[in-house]
């Protein structure tokens, strides 16, 4: 990961008052949700 990108993650996490790993986890969750993956899992479980 480039230093510039890493700095953006650090800045964003600091701004939100959360850890860098939490920021990345939330970003991944948001991306997966935007793909509709969670809806697919829920419909398969029924």
Image (spheres, rainbow, N blue to C red):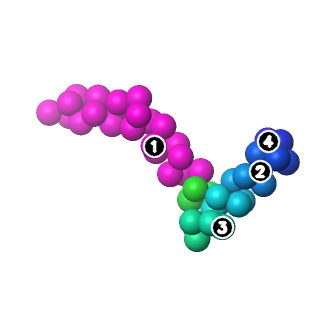
Which residue in the structure is indicated by mark 3?
A: 14
Q: Earlier in the sequence, mark 1 or mark 3?
A: 3
Q: CA distance from mark 4 to mark 3?
A: 19 Å
- Residue 11 appears at what percent x and percent y? 71, 60
Q: Name the residue nearer the viewer: 41 or 13.
A: 13
Residue 11 colored magenta?
Answer: no
Q: Residues within 10 Å of mark 2 (few under 14, many from 20)?
A: few
**Left or right placement of residue 7 versus residue 33 in this view:** right
Which residue in the structure is indicated by mark 2?
A: 6
- Residue 38 appears at what percent x and percent y? 33, 36
Q: Residue at x 29, y 29 (%)?
A: 40
- Looking at the rendering, the stretch of residues picked out in magenta corresponds to 24-46
- What secondary structure is found at the residue carrying circle 1? helix
Q: CA distance from mark 4 to mark 1?
A: 20 Å
Q: Residues within 10 Å of mark 3 (few under 14, many from 20)?
A: few
Which of the labelled discs sits on residue 30, or is there none? Answer: 1
Residues tagged 2 and 3 counted as in contact (Cβ below 8 A):
no
Which residue in the structure is indicated by mark 4?
A: 1
Q: Earlier in the sequence, mark 2 or mark 3?
A: 2
In the rendered image, is residue 19 in sight?
no
Q: CA distance from mark 4 to mark 2?
A: 7 Å
Q: Residue at x 24, y 36 (%)?
A: 42
Residues tagged 1 and 2 counted as in contact (Cβ below 8 A):
no
- Residue 36 appears at what percent x and percent y? 35, 30
- What secondary structure is found at the residue carrying circle 4? loop
Q: Nearer the viewer, mark 4 or mark 3?
A: 3
Q: Earlier in the sequence, mark 4 or mark 1?
A: 4
Secondary structure mostly seen in the magenta stretch = helix
**Left or right placement of residue 4 versus residue 8 in this view:** right
């Amino acid at each position: 990961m480039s230093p510039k990108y890493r700095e953006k993650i650090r800045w964003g996490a600091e701004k939100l008052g959360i850890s860098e790993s939490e920021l990345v986890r939330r970003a991944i969750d948001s991306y997966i949700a935007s793909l509709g993956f969670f809806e697919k899992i829920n419909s398969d479980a029924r």
